Image: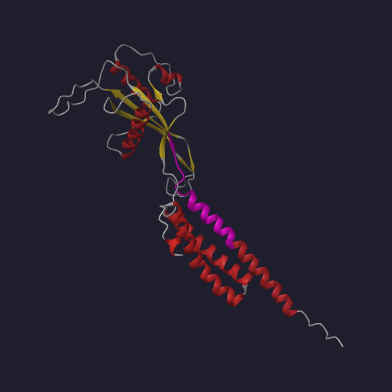
Amino acid sequence: MNALLAINWEPELRGIIIVIIAVGTLCGSVYLILGTNLGARLGLLVALAGLAGWMFILGATWWTYSKGLLGDEPSWKPVAGKTIIREYEALSELGLLDAPFTATDDVTADADSVEALLVDQDWAKLDSALPSFQQAASAGTEVVIAAETFAAGEFQVVNVFDIGGERSPILFDGKIDFIAFFHKPHYVLVEIAPLVPQRTEPGRAPARSVIDTSRPHEYVYMIRDLGSKRVPAAIITISSLVILLLTCWLLHTRDQRVRENRSAKALPAGV
């Protein structure tokens, strides 16, 4: 036992041993007491029913308040095949703009025209002070750097456009929305502008970033992944409820058999 407890391999082996000892001590001690009073099989059923009921209450609490064992957080994911859009014309080809768009030599005017068309097509332009703007901009920055389109400090996020994500069903003009389990796809379009290369000199503060008006803007197209934050808690809650109902049914049928056997007439004694 001393050698077993001296194992210090974090976190796999030591964590597994701690869980085994904890389960054996807590659940095993309860089963030992029940087994000595009710018998091995009946004590096991009662112990399983109590454990399942406790896990059901714990899982329901985790599921309600989003605590305990959690899954993946919601995040922005690149849209496969059309994540980084480098040309204005590609916005029409990919279906983001309804009407065909033809770029001109004026990069700034083209960017403004694309912005106006997106707003006309129900894309919402997010304010830079909103947390949703910062989240989408951060995710778009990571996608651009990972794709090696630009390096860090070579571009700037200028706009974020948002569309979709409506929830349903919402009743009584939005007063009841806790049953709105269905969501429409939620998309975001992050507009980035390349910066003019700045020369760095030792001992001097870096120059202020300046957008390069001779190069076209690029766009990062992403979709919202709602994640699975409450899925582990939901699985624990539902599976514990099934085990609880099953063990309670087995206990109930056993009580019925015992009651029938006790109410039956005794057999006549043999001569």
Q: Seen in the image, is 88 located left or right of residue 251?
A: left
**Image spot of residue 187 (x, y percent):** 42, 32
- Left or right for 213, reference 92: left
Query: Magenta span has 239?
Result: yes
- Figure quadrant of the C terminus: bottom right
Tag count in the figure? 0
Q: Can residue 165 be seen in this view?
A: no
Residue, far right: 271
User: How far across and how far down the image is residue 266, in percent?
Assistant: 79, 83
Outermost residue, bottom side: 271
Does residue 265 sit above or below 92 in this rendering?
below
Tell me the colour scheme of the image.
secondary structure
Farthest left residue in view = 203
**Residues in magenta, as a range:** 223-244
Residue drawn at (55%, 58%) of the image: 240
Image coordinates for residue 256, horizontal then vertical, percent: 69, 72
Nearest to the observer: residue 110 or residue 27: 27
109 left or right of 69 in image: left
**Residue 16 drawn at (x, y percent):** 47, 56
User: Which one is in front, 121 or 220?
Assistant: 220
Residue at 43% across / 61% down in the picture? 5
In the rendered image, the vertical position of residue 51 relative to residue 39, given as above or below? above
Indicate the quadrant where residue 222 lies.
top left
Q: Main secondary structure of the magenta part?
A: helix
- Whether residue 240 sits left or right of residue 85 in the image: it is right
When the figure is inspected, residue 211 is found, relative to residue 63, above or below; the finding is: above
- Specify the quadrant of the image occupied by residue 120: top left
Which is more toward the observer, 68 or 199? 199
* Residue 51 visible in image: yes
Most extreme residue toward the front is 3
Residue 24 is covered by the magenta coloring = no
Residue 265 falls in image quadrant: bottom right
